[in-house]
Amino acid sequence: MKSFDGDLALDEKFGDLEIEHTSGPVNFNVEQGNADIDQLHSGSLKFKGFSQVRIGELSGVVDARFWSGGRVDLGLSRDLQKLSINADNVKPLNITNLKPANAELKIHSSLSKIIYNGNILLSLTLKKSLSLTLKKPLPTDTVFITGKNDTSQKGREKLLNLKRISVTAMKSIDYTLKTGLANTQIKIDASFCVVNIKD
């Protein structure tokens, strides 16, 4: 299908979906099929048992659910108003163009790995006091840590000398990321996933 204007409802099993542009709103329920969509504006998406779902540009208000599948590629746009994603056993879930979307992104992860601009997000618990020193050049085993709820501190190089540190990487953890004006609400609930987010 090249393009479709207006409401579009689709319930499909064992078939692939290809659309260049849809003005929406849409209601897609696809099982055991892949999807390749260039532009999608508003709607409800459900994909189960797929190898790949690609949506080049999301806009409007979108509610999406992906489960028991392979790769998901979602590109955000400046015209995105609200996005809610529920992902269960999807590897990887790739989200790009976070910064142009002016996003306030809230992630609830359960047994998932969250990567932001190539950095794995972790929750760290200190058992003893922390000493902080700055060194250049930095050794190869350097640990970088930014302030709580702040992923924008790239300028300062921090080398942490720790005696005891506990790293919580795979439990249930909540993260918040903000870009630009942070006026677009994006919520991700991920279980057993690898979530890869890029500005």
Image (cartoon, rainbow, N blue to C red):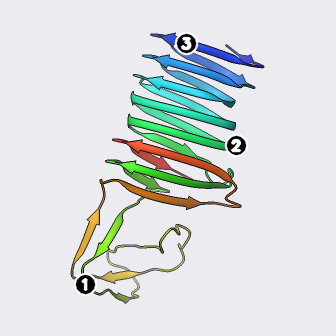
In the rendered image, the residue lying farthest to the left is 164
**SS for dot 1:** loop
Please report the residue visible at 38 percent of the width from the left and 56 percent of the height from the top. Answer: 173
Q: Amino acid at mark 1?
A: Lys
Q: Earlier in the sequence, mark 2 or mark 3?
A: 3
28 or 142: nearer the viewer = 28
Report the residue marked by disc 3: 11
**SS for dot 3:** strand
Report the residue marked by disc 1: 128
Residue 80 is labelled as 2
**Label 3 – label 1 distance at C-alpha:** 56 Å
Q: Earlier in the sequence, mark 2 or mark 1?
A: 2
Q: Amino acid at mark 2?
A: Leu
Q: Is residue 144 left or right of residue 58?
A: left
Question: Quarter-wise, where is residue 163 in the image?
Answer: bottom left
140 or 45: nearer the viewer = 45
Q: Position of residue 87 (x, y in %)?
A: 44, 37
**Label 2 – label 3 distance at C-alpha:** 24 Å
One can see residue 77 in this view: no
Q: Amino acid at mark 3?
A: Asp
Image position of 174 with respect to 74: above or below: below
**SS for dot 2:** strand
**The N terminus: image quadrant:** top right
Q: Earlier in the sequence, mark 3 or mark 1?
A: 3
Q: Position of residue 35 (x, y in %)?
A: 54, 22
Q: Position of residue 33 (x, y in %)?
A: 46, 17
